[in-house]
Image (cartoon, coloured by chain):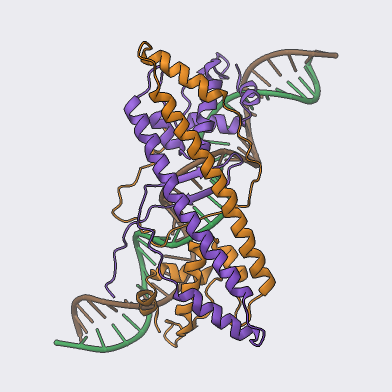
Chain colours: A orange, B purple, C brown, D green
DNA sequence: CTTGACGTTGAACTTATGTTCAACGTTAGC
DNA sequence: GCTAACGTTGAACATAAGTTCAACGTCAAG
């Protein structure tokens, strides 16, 4: 299978496939005499796994260390370890999200609770002091890095926030 | 207040303070005749706000557009809008996290459920086909960009999902 | 033989949030 | 006047996961 076809089959871009190979994530690739890459059918399956793992929150680096050369021989312990760690990460993250959400909701209601006899500036001050009085919210369980990417992150034609190139005086 | 003292007061690094200034986020800074930056006491408060907003999931860019020059005059509508959007983003993220977690837990139990009479390779195959048979899990609620940073700057990120250009099957 | 689709490469670019560094200037204390 | 601590700058580096580009090679059809 040539790269274009594999891309079509998996829904990935060819640049992604080449990138995965470059970082040592996708090793099942050979070369034809003309230099073209050629993939075994198994590659499709492996890429499916990679995509899934990524959706589940694994980094490519993690996936690389977990993926065995032979899909029949996994490092059972390392895998279970990684899975349970990832689950713990997610739980920690869930806790943080819940807290952020609570915090934001509190802020919203607080802003809306402006007494009728208070002007905006005073209300701003009231809300501000309320907000800043909140404790540091020590969510000490700082898990490792969790990164969840969704499946199709193509950013062509998306109106992207342009980062402005820092003002130079 | 000189930069070192502000850093001490806020717990931020001086490089961070200079960076915030560079990207136009922290504007309350003057210069002494010797070139040294000097900050009003208000800067402490602003930085507290920035830090909080960041913890709540706002990017520096978002914070920059929301933060008024004068803390007494906020753009009420823009603020409420941003807050409610951010809450929605968090909820979408929570849904995705819950799903990922479920998925991982299922995988763990599935791996552990190896029949005694099955060898590892066969079990690997069994689990693998199970995993790959799972549907694409279409979490269609596509929020805008959500980026949550925790206090120590590790991040969870969800990137924007755009239907890719693609390739008809 | 030409054209278009497909393939190859390495390097540079992207995003967001900073840090680090070298080279240099200022200030306070002794 | 020396030294340490602090300040300044611009540029480069770091991360993760790719994309984009230019310049070039290959192949199948007409």
Q: Residue at x 63, y 62 (%)?
A: A84
Q: Quadrant of the C terminus of chain B?
A: bottom left
B42 above or below C18?
Answer: above
Left or right of residue A154: residue B11 = right
* Number of residue marks: 0
Residue toward you, A31 or B135? B135
Q: Position of residue A117 (x, y in %)?
A: 36, 10
In the image, taking residue B67 as reference, residue B165 lies left or right, namely left
Give the camera-side residue of A129 and B109: B109
**The N terminus of chain B, quarter of image:** top right
Which residue is at the front of the view, A113 or D27?
A: A113
Q: Quadrant of residue C30?
A: top right
How far across and down, in percent of the image, does residue A136 sit? Answer: 61, 31
Residue drawn at x 61%, y 26% is B10
Residue A61 position in % (x across, y down):
58, 63
Horizontal placement of B38 versus B161: left or right? right
Q: Position of residue B115 (x, y in %)?
A: 63, 83
Can residue A111 be seen?
A: yes
B91 relative to B100, above or below: above
Closer-to-camera residue (A1/A73)? A73
Q: Quadrant of residue A119?
A: top left
Q: Is residue B168 left or right of residue C27?
A: left
Position of residue B35 relative to residue B61, above or below, is above
| Residue B47 in view, yes or no | no
D21 over A143 or under it: above or below:
below
Q: Residue at x 52, y 74 (%)?
A: A26
Give the residue furthest to the top: A117
Q: Quadrant of residue B24?
A: top left
């Amino acid at each position: 299978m040539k790269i274009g076809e594999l891309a079509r089959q998996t829904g990935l871009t060819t640049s992604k496939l080449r990138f995965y190979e470059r970082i040592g994530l996708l090793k099942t690739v050979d070369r034809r005499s003309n230099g073209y890459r050629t993939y075994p059918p198994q590659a499709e399956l492996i890429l499916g796994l990679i995509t899934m793992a990524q959706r589940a929150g694994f980094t490519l680096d993690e996936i690389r260390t977990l993926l065995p050369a032979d899909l029949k021989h996994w490092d059972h312990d390392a895998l279970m370890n990684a899975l349970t760690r990832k689950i713990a990460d997610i739980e920690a993250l869930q806790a943080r999200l819940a807290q952020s959400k609570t915090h934001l909701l509190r802020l919203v209601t607080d802003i809306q609770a402006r007494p009728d006899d208070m002007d905006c500036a005073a209300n701003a001050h009231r809300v501000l002091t309320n907000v800043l009085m909140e404790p540091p919210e020590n969510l000490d369980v700082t898990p490792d890095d969790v990164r969840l990417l969704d499946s199709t992150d193509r950013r062509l034609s998306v109106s992207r926030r342009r980062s402005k190139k820092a003002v130079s005086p």
